[in-house]
Image (cartoon, rainbow, N blue to C red):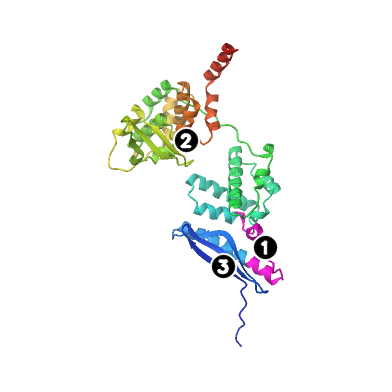
Amino acid sequence: MKKKKVKEYVKILERKRKNGTYLFLVYRLPNGIRKQEATGLALVDGNSPIDKESNRIVKKAVEKMKADRTAQILSGKYDVNFSINGKQKIRLCDYIEMKNNISQRANKTRRGYMNLRKHIQDYTPNININEVDKNWVVSFLSTLSNLKPASIKLYCTLLSATMRQAIKDKIIASNPVAELPPEEKPKAKQAKRDYLTPEELERLMSAFPRKTAQQREGLRMFLFSCYTGLRFSDVVNLQWENIKKDASNGKSYFVIEMQKTKEIVRGYLSSKALALIECNHNSNSNVFFGGAYLSNANKWLKVASTKVGIEKNVSFHTARHTFAVNLLHSGMDIYSVSRLLGHTDIKTTQIYLEMMPKKQIEASEMIDKIF
């Protein structure tokens, strides 16, 4: 006998767009009505392992939605819900992984999201996005109590960003993380920020090891960061095409997109910063050859600072603090310093004022003169 073909009430439709192939569910209900629902998910174009894995997760999620819809129809619920609820049955872990694979995030951020996924996987691996509420968030964060406060705060921030993205994708209606009152949100202890005075920087330079090409490059990169305020990730990725000359005054400047914030930052180069790179201008696209990896640079800085008796926690990021604090000490306004650092919020720059007791004393003396 010929096997009877099972009627397919729900089909998956693919529609090609410029930025990917979007997936829809097409319904043919028993009462003859035809409807279509956007899943909010899309396949990416590409054959890399990351692209293939992302597409696998998306297809799995859409197949699950199709199966759920089919079950609704077969159980007699012909009035299929086309509201936000139609896309809620996506596992939170799958959604985090899918979005992480197709994003343009920095590697450090991507690792953060994958670590968040791992912690959720350990806690409630099969929870769907629509099942996440305030109580679940509080309970989940409590399972991270063995981690450092900064790590717990980071995972809370990444979870909130994930839920905001799910709102944009019309998978959920509200962000449960935002419902937490201030006292329940994780807080990280303010890390101690150190900076170098010009005199300390001179001493550090004199003691910095220079036996290898990597060490010499590490020092060059650190000093360039002190003179420009750029992070290690921006210095190591700086290319000659980012260095330009202002035709109106003949001065050189850089224009880059910051690796961390994606903010476009422009800054003129001081004579000291320019001297560091002009001597090495060649056909390579990168200004620095990048051989001085961050861990090595931090190790050498520690050796040098200990040797000359600088009792501060000196790392490559100290260069950025050195740039900011010394400019503020010299009288530059905080807004200009904030723009040079590429801060998206001036409150971040205001932290540097706490590192300047001299300025705080000047403020109290100024109040005495005014009043």
Q: Residues within 10 Å of mark 1 (few under 14, many from 20)?
A: few
Q: Nearer the viewer, mark 1 or mark 2?
A: 1
Q: Residues within 10 Å of mark 3 (few under 14, many from 20)?
A: some
The answer to whether 44 appears left or right of 267 in the picture is right
User: Which of the pair 203/108 is nearer the observer?
Assistant: 108
Q: What residue is shown with label 1?
A: 81
Q: Residues within 10 Å of mark 2 (few under 14, many from 20)?
A: many
Determine if residue 115 is in view: yes
Sequence-wise, which precedes: disc 3 or disc 2? Answer: 3
Q: What residue is shown with label 3?
A: 12
Q: Amino acid at mark 3?
A: Ile
Q: Nearer the viewer, mark 1 or mark 3?
A: 1
Determine if residue 321 is in view: no
Which mark, by number, is residue 71? none
Cα distance, mark 1 to mark 2? Answer: 46 Å
Q: Amino acid at mark 1?
A: Asn
Q: Position of residue 230 (x, y in %)?
A: 43, 34
Sequence-wise, which precedes: disc 1 or disc 3? Answer: 3
Which mark, by number, is residue 342? 2
On the image, which quarter does residue 225 sit in?
Answer: top left
Label 1 element class: loop
The tally of labels here is: 3
Magenta span includes 79: yes
User: Which of the pair 241/229 is nearer the observer?
Assistant: 241
In magenta, the rendered stretch is 67-92
Q: Amino acid at mark 2?
A: Gly
Badge 1 vs badge 2, beta-carbon distance below 8 Å:
no
Q: Position of residue 294 (x, y in %)?
A: 43, 38
Say which residue appears at 66% left-offset and 58% top-offset: 85
